[in-house]
Image (cartoon, rainbow, N blue to C red):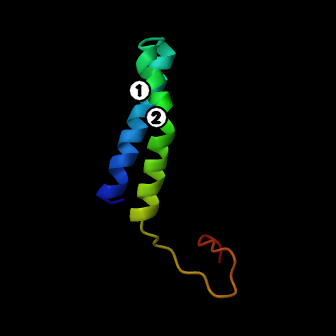
Amino acid sequence: MNKAEWIPALIVSSLLLVYCLLVFWGKASGFAAFIFTFSPLLVIWLVYSVIRHGEYKGRELKSDEEFGYTDKQ
């Protein structure tokens, strides 16, 4: 995982943890609502960065293959 992938993953995961703790403790409901409101944008950012900067290390599919399970021989 390169830097462009783990920074969004760390930020989004941390905000999810903060949100869960705030809801569990019943504190700072305004901040929890703020996180909840902007969470779809954060998830889109996370998915975009992983798709954009991710590297696939498996084998490529052949022309007659539809699925490429690398754990099956």
51 in relation to 33, above or below: below
Residue 39 at x, y = what percent? Answer: 48, 36
Secondary structure beneath disc 2? helix
- Which image quadrant: the C terminus? bottom right
Which numbered disc flags the more N-terminal residue, 2 or 1? 1
Mark 2 vs mark 1: give the one in front. 2
Q: Which residue is mark 1?
A: 18
Give, as a three-letter code, the residue at label 1.
Val
Secondary structure beneath disc 1? helix
Q: Residue drawn at (37%, 47%), measured in percent from left and top?
A: 8
Label 2 and label 1: CA atoms lie apart by: 14 Å
Residue 31 at x, y = what percent? Answer: 41, 20
Give the quarter of the image for residue 4: bottom left
6 in relation to 55, above or below: above
Q: Residue furthest bottom?
A: 63
* Residue 63 shows in this picture: yes
Which residue is at the front of the view, 71 or 57?
57
2 relative to 33 in the view: left or right: left
Residue 13 at x, y = what percent? Answer: 42, 38
8 in relation to 29, above or below: below
Give, as a three-letter code, the residue at label 2.
Phe
Count of numbered marks:
2
Q: Which residue is mark 2?
A: 38
* Residue 21 shows in this picture: no
